[in-house]
Image (cartoon, grey):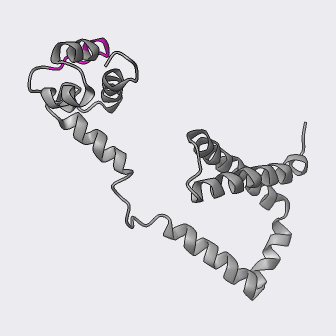
Amino acid sequence: MLTLRQWATPLTVGSFLVMGVTGMLMFFRMNTFLGKVIHEWAGWMMLIGVGAHILLNWRALTTYFKRPLAMWIMSVGAALTLATLLPVGGTNGPPIRSVVMAVAQADEATLMALSGHDLQEGRTLLSEAGVDLQPGQSLADATDGDFGLQSAALSALFASGDDH
């Protein structure tokens, strides 16, 4: 069985590499969906690795609490970490969310016009997706606010293809 010392530092270094590269890509808006997912999971791996590394090196770590510069750096890090928990700005989420919500709130005729389908064809597609849309009803009302069902319905209506 592996000892803590055999995997703690390699896990910390490996996860730091992934976090650093994917974090820079996210910063410069060059990230992908997969990159974001990997970044999030690498964060958990980094927490495990760093936690194990701290356990192994606790005595050495405590010496830094006696050094003013080290304490200042760690305090700034702690303050920035706490600041990320404050609900400041950007609470509405990505702009596309507002667009999707507006489409889901649109009445049947508007929804079909946006999707490029006539009413009958659109109703058939929605029915196949598990949504029974009544005349004048919005997709949000027809799905009782179920975002998963709305997503399936919108995918059915707006799927790429040569049929519309």
Residue that lies at the very extreme toward the left in this rendered image: 136
Q: Position of residue 71 (x, y in %)?
A: 70, 81
Q: Position of residue 138 (x, y in %)?
A: 16, 30
User: Which stretch appears magenta?
Assistant: 127-133
Q: Is residue 2 left or right of residue 91?
A: right
Main secondary structure found in the magenta portion: loop
State which quarter of the image contains the N terminus.
Answer: top right
The residue that appears at 34% across and 45% down in the rendered structure is 97
Could you say which quadrant of the image residue 55 lies in?
Answer: bottom right
The residue that appears at 81% across and 54% down in the rendered structure is 13
From the viewer's perspective, is residue 164 above or below residue 111? above
The residue that appears at 58% across and 43% down in the rendered structure is 32
Q: Is residue 123 left or right of residue 12?
A: left
From the viewer's perspective, is residue 95 above or below residue 154? below
Q: Position of residue 134 (x, y in %)?
A: 12, 20
From the viewer's perspective, is residue 52 above or below residue 142? below
From the viewer's perspective, is residue 153 above or below residue 11? above
